[in-house]
Image: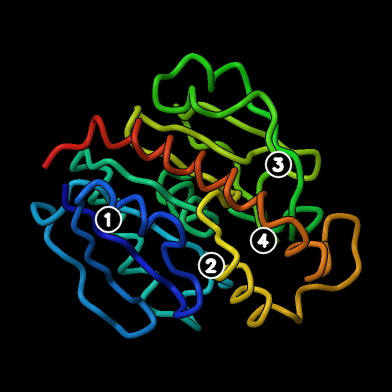
Amino acid sequence: MRIHSLHHVPFEGLGSIAAWAEKNDHSVTTTRLYQDNDFPGMTDFAMLIIMGGPMSVHDSTTYPWLEAEKTFISQAIKADKTILGICLGAQLIAHVLGAKVYPNKKKEIGWFPVNATPNAQKNSITRALPESMEAFHWHGETFSLPKNAQLLASSQACKNQAFLYTDRVLGLQFHLETTPASARSLILHGQDEMVPAPYVQTPEMIMAQPARFEKINALMHALLDALSLGARE
């Protein structure tokens, strides 16, 4: 399967998704928005993966390429592509679908529980999500639920943590792809955000239990296995 990924900053890549793609012999191409790379044609990929970043979907003045990216994502949805959006990626999908993206009441940075909704168990793609899990978070904004989308997960600090649209478009506000290396990179480049708050952990707390990363990476792979079954070349 041909996968295309969208990256917004050099320090936030595919994480454990890269290992999943290699294990399954999927090819991966990348548009690095921060380098003004071109977008592929709609016939050049089957799955689109939109990664995170520190900017907002509303920051088009600072990042002019955001408008072109939104157009590309909209085209991919209309072309019935299989799409996964993570953090900013999920916010971009929600925005393109007409939902609001706005500051959450509290920032979430670190490891916090996420609870699956009954909708998650009704769908073969998201049935892999446990009823409750400890996920990795790094976000200050959230989104309203797009029209016709199913809410899949919530946390105490943020109601809309995951959604599924038309059985092909999955948005995750939280991170399951994060590895110890990618977490260290986020900490290095996001230290100014790590101020004391109810849902903001210290770097030491984030890195304290390596087994956490293994658990979320296994969940990420299970979700990708299910999501990729419906991908059309």
Left/right placement of residue 55 relative to residue 15 reads right
Residue 134: which numbered mark, if any?
3
Which marked residue is nearer to the observer: mark 2 or mark 3? 3
Lower sequence index among marks 4 and 2: 2
Kindly indicate whether the residue at mark 3 contacts the one at mark 4 (C-beta within 8 angstroms). no
- In the shown orientation, is residue 50 left or right of residue 207? left
In three-dimensional space, the C-alpha distance between marks 4 and 2, rounded to whole angstroms, equals 18 Å
Q: Is mark 3 on a helix, strand or loop?
A: strand
Marks 3 and 1, how far apart at CA: 26 Å
Residue at left 55%, top 29%? 129
Say above or below: 192 vs 143.
below
Residue depth check, mark 4 versus mark 2: number of the one nearer the observer: 4
Q: Which amino acid does label 3 sit on?
A: Glu
Frontmost of labels 1 and 2 is: 1
Q: What residue type is labelled 4?
A: Trp
Mark 1 or 2, nearer chain start: 1
Figure coloring: rainbow
Q: Which of marks 1 and 4 is nearer the N terminus?
A: 1
Label 3 CA crowd tier, 10 Å (few <14, some 14–19, many 20+): some
Please tell me the numbered disc located at residue 138.
4
Mark 1 or mark 3, which is nearer the start of the sequence? Answer: 1
Secondary structure beneath dot 4 equals: strand
Q: Foreground mark, 4 or 3?
A: 3
Look at 33% across and 65% down and name the residue there: 69
* Discs 3/1, front: 1
Task: State the residue position of label 1.
Answer: 22
Q: What residue type is labelled 1?
A: Glu
| Cβ atoms under marks 2 and 3 closer than 8 Å | no
CA gap between label 4 and label 3 equals: 13 Å
Q: Quadrant of the C terminus?
A: top left
| Residue 58: mark in rendering | 2
